[in-house]
Image: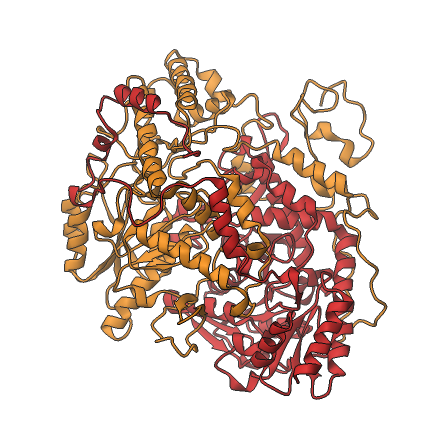
Chain colours: A red, B orange
Amino acid sequence: MRYLPLTAADRAAMLATIGVASVDELFHDVPVSARLDGPIKALPNHQGELAVERRLREMAERNVPAGSVACFLGAGAYRHHVPASVDYLIQRGEFLTSYTPYQPEITQGTLQYLFEFQTQVAMLTGMEVANASLYDGATACAEAVMMANRVTRRKKAVLSGGLHPHYCAVTETEARFVGFELVEAAPDPEGTEDLAGLVDDATSCVVVQYPSVFGQVHDYTALAQACHAKGALLIVVVTEAVALGLLPSPGSMGADIVAAEGQSLGNALSFGGPYVGLFACRDKFVRQMPGRLCGETVDADGRRGFVLTLSTREQHIRREKATSNICTNSGLCALAFTIHLSLLGESGLGHLARLNHAMAVQLADKIAALPGVSVLNDGFFNEFTVRLPRRARKVVDALTARGVLAGVPVSRLFPQDDRLADLMLVAVTETNTEAQMDALCWALKEVL
Amino acid sequence: MNAMTPPPTSASDDISAVGGPGTVSGHRGLQLEEALIFELDRPGHAGVDLPPVPDVPLRLGGLAPRARIGLPDLSEPEVVRHYTRLSQKNYAIDAGIYPLGSCTMKHNPRLNEKMARLPGFADVHPMQPESTVQGALQLIDALAHWLKTLTGMPAVALSPAAGAQGELCGMMAIRAALDHREGGKTARRRVLVPESAHGTNPATAVACGFTVATIPANDRGRVDLEAFKAKLDGDVAAIMLTNPNTCGLFEPDIVEIAQAVHDVGAFFYCDGANFNAIVGRVRPADLGIDAMHINLHKTFSTPHGGGGPGSGPVVLSEPLAPFAPYPYLVHTADSLRLVESAADPTADGRAFGRLKGFHGQMGMFVRALSYMMSHGADGLYQAASDAVLNANYVMARLRDLLPPTFEGPCMHEALFDDRSLKDTGVETLGIAKALIDEGFHPFTVYFPLVVHGAMLIEPTETESKRSLDRFINSLRGLILRAKAGDTAHFDAAPHFTPRRRLDETQAARKPVLRWKQG
């Protein structure tokens, strides 16, 4: 029991100080019927590091790590190279084992990096202000819709057919319980939907994804204008933050709120979590934002310092009138994001984004040259949609057996729509090699 | 500004603008000042080396590539130094006792970190074919088994991203079950919440479409049973009760409360934030609860990380289990698979929806399971015992100077108030800030709200007796100092921190939420 520092002598002395004969007496408020008389027998007893490590390694080794094969999976989670210093720095105990910075005098480290993170997110999205992070991109999307409802005092949101189905589903769940209306456009792999026509005087917001879940990039300037003409907000969702190193920012197109997934900077795939939700908006909406905010101030000696602020929006002050029930952010994942982005900097991020895009263009051309295969998108970042002559799930399974994780079958995301069954999403990052791209094309050729 | 400060040569060298008096540099020994990363910008540097970009035309659908973003450029050593210096401005459980009541700041074993970083867990994409992730699903299944066995509950929803989202999950399952039972939107409107509850509880109830009715506490810090029964009727959907409660006390009438709730057709949501006090010693199922979230970052030692990420699985009773959200795990003849949406052929459509992207906080699952396996059933039993023992020891050793708010043994945390500071001119906040100067993280202040000037001390089981004695002796010394009338010491504290007291009023009145080019 290596995590427990009390010795038997300590325990005896402490019980004597308290004035009870045994710890059991301290549990006297527990109904007798609910007291266990000893450790639960259905579970194993304590084990040393070696035994635990051996057992967990067995489980880990039953998985195929994405890095051990040619992997072209994206659809909202991207495998980028994370510099070694990121993981070293976030494991410093002063970051890892600190709590929410409620005592700012002894948590200036956390507070300063959150302030820097907020600035980076605002810059990246082209917005005026950002919060200290939310759970993930999907929850950030749902929170953005609820914020738009509060700001506009309307209760109808329009969701693009290019929005990731998980993001739709999380927003639908909130809509059911909170009580607001959703207008959901049909899946839009070709990128031809007209959302402006769905906006009316009751619409609180339109939610689009950039690039869309099918990889397509769009200029949303006209849509933003159409929204604003009806008093609605434009929410832009981004699931691949690296794209913002090359694409014009959502803010420059007129977005009012940006909700994004920050995993692709600093954070491992980790089978889907923990990730980090990015949330940015216009200054004038700041008091309607969900989640934590860090702000600059001065200390008693007049020196610059940082504190959590505007907490009158939050549940621990406002209780049932809070802007959301959120209590934590995604602190350590936000730290990984901000360190990675600091290492990249202006020049590195631009370079990384161009590299991803150029490699994706090369692969798209190679795949489009295969007989019976076409690429749907005319504009994309590092992910595009391929139409196959067969059901994509079968193709993906056949390629998995050949050591290639070829892509995400669109049917896994949109299982209800059989017309999409021959589509596959293919993502390329700097971690892919030319040999892997060739292997993908060869394997595709073989199974088709 | 100090008269000896040399003129700044650039924005980033002007450390005296943010630094303290007394030294030329603004640093004070190991307390190193650090500018904002944007002020360290040296355009043209990069902290990464990337391969050249293939020379192909852009294919951005007619969009022009982005112009300047404004991010700073730095080399790798500068970045490492920046964050290392920032880290040194933080207090952490690795460095000392962190007795924040209701937060369970216990030791974070590094084995957990090592396990979560195995490529078989960390480098697995959530959309990989299920044949390539059977070990990950096996781990999720194993975690579910431990959580179900420890709580005695038949089902668990693993996807909630944090405790507050776990509350949402549990309350949404309750609403879905009521809607299903009544064949439409339930007519039940109210959720009963004790006044001592975490703020997340009422916020959650409202987010699920309910209104909140507050139940008062009795003079022993527990739910007032008569007041509770007076508010209980067929309009009540659920009660949300924290147990052990936020006063650090076990609710002795909990079984009776559960029975009464069930008798009117309502459900019992238990806030499991304080599960650490009873894990392995009491199974919540035996108390009659229907749903309870478990903060893996509290009870099961996953790191708090400066405010997340958390993980908040929810155990569910038989009537609520069918309403658990997507995705959920099912066993087939020879493998494990995830049911991800209502379109799955095996889904019966009762799942209430989806709470987050993908499948849950996998990295936290690995850490929590690593902790559970290390402790085992016997270790968890002992951990809960020691957590309660430590809290009672703190209470016993402070009692003569700082009377506890409620008599009798506490569970995992000891609650005090500011009665004994009356007429000293020193308040709870002053004691907390002075503790910082003594080298300790303060206790939770001013929560629960039902107690005036609350001081809530949760030492956890991972503090040694020596560590507790040092903390207690310092706190006793401070209380004596307050009683001796040295108010100036407390008003000015902390003195020895990287920053002294910060002006939170200014921060809120004129919010500066980002850096801007000067």
Q: Is B46 above or below relative to A201?
A: above
Q: Is A56 above or below relative to B18?
A: below
Q: Is residue B491 left or right of residue A336?
A: left
Q: Nearer the viewer, residue B431 or A309?
A: B431
Q: Nearer the viewer, residue A162 or B350?
A: B350
Residue A154 visible: no
Q: Nearer the viewer, residue A96 or B379?
A: B379
Q: Nearer the viewer, residue A309 or B138?
A: B138
Q: Quadrant of residue B219?
A: top left
Quadrant placement of the N terminus of chain A = top left
Q: Is B240 above or below relative to A137?
A: above
Q: Is residue A310 left or right of residue B256?
A: right
Give the farthest residue toward the right: B55
Q: Is residue A162 left or right of residue A202?
A: right
Residue B273 position within the rendered picture, expressed as x and y whole percent measured from the top left: 36, 45
Residue A176 position within the rendered picture, expressed as x and y whole percent measured from the top left: 38, 69
Residue A143 position within the rendered picture, expressed as x and y whole percent measured from the top left: 49, 60
Residue A360 visible: yes
What residue is at 41 percent from the left and 54 percent from the top? B143
Give the farthest residue toward the top: B484
Residue B207 position within the rendered picture, expressed as x and y whole percent measured from the top left: 38, 59
Q: Is residue B210 left or right of residue A400?
A: left
Quadrant placement of the C terminus of chain A = bottom right
What residue is at 28 percent from the left and 74 percent from the top? B184
Q: Is B47 above or below relative to A102?
A: below
- The mark total stands at 0
What residue is at 47 percent from the left and 74 percent from the top? A202
Q: Quadrant of residue B127?
A: bottom right
